Image (spheres, rainbow, N blue to C red):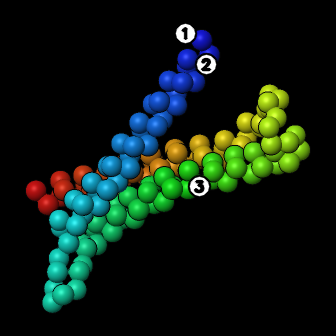
């Protein structure tokens, strides 16, 4: 395999991880909703499920921020280079590696938050059995 093949594998696997993490966050919120208690029209979530819910929501926020930060950084980079080189330029460009750091931070944060949410949810489920 070439270096570009490994990069393609990374993109494919990290994209799949993002998709699965997003689905798991929504599923975790759905499981928490099953345990909510309605009392006279008011909805209450058991106190032990607030932390996992917050982690799932935080994971979804990181999912959004991963793509928003990338769009802002790469959109700004494109616009600046377009102004500098002209709209039709085919000149090869390099960008600093740190441009990817916000997206990577939010990617890994998302995975850690959702995993943490599931660990707390599992703890809750085992405690009620």
Q: Between 83 and 21, which is closer to the camera in this rendering?
A: 83
Outermost residue toward the front in this view: 88
Mark linked to residue 4: 2
Residue 60 appears in which quarter of the rendering? Answer: bottom left
- Does residue 24 appear in the picture of this structure? yes
58 above or below 46? above
In this picture, residue 45 sits left or right of residue 22: left
97 above or below 41? above
Which residue is located at x 14 percent, y 60 percent? 128
Mark linked to residue 68: 3
Q: Position of residue 127 (x, y in %)?
A: 18, 58
Kindly identify which residue carries mark 1. Answer: 1
| Marks 2/1: CA–CA distance | 8 Å
Q: Position of residue 100 (x, y in %)?
A: 66, 41
In this picture, residue 7 sits left or right of residue 49: right
Label 2: which secondary element: helix
Label 1: which secondary element: loop
Which residue is located at x 60 percent, y 11 percent? 2
> Which callout, 3 or 1, points at the residue further toward the start of the chain?
1
Instruction: Tell me whether the residue at label 2 lies in contact with that at label 1, contact meaning CB atoms closer than 8 angstroms.
Output: no
> Which callout, 2 or 3, points at the residue further toward the start of the chain?
2
| Marks 2/3: CA–CA distance | 25 Å
Outermost residue toward the bottom in this view: 40
| Marks 3/1: CA–CA distance | 32 Å
Q: Between 57 and 71, which is closer to the camera in this rendering?
A: 71
Which residue is located at x 22 percent, y 67 percent? 33
- Does residue 55 appear in the picture of this structure? no
Q: Position of residue 90 (x, y in %)?
A: 79, 30
């Amino acid at each position: 395999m070439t270096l570009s093949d490994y990069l393609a594998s990374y993109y494919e696997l990290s994209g799949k991880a993002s998709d699965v993490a997003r689905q798991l966050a929504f599923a975790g919120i759905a499981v928490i909703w099953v345990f909510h208690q309605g009392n006279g029209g008011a909805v209450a979530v058991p106190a032990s499920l607030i932390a996992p819910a917050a982690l799932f929501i935080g994971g979804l926020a990181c999912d959004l921020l991963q793509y928003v930060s990338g769009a802002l950084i790469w959109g700004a980079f494109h616009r600046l280079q377009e102004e500098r080189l002209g709209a039709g330029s085919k000149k090869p460009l390099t960008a600093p590696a740190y441009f990817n750091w916000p997206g990577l931070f939010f990617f890994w944060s998302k995975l850690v938050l959702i995993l943490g949410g599931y660990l707390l949810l599992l703890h809750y489920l085992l405690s009620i059995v």
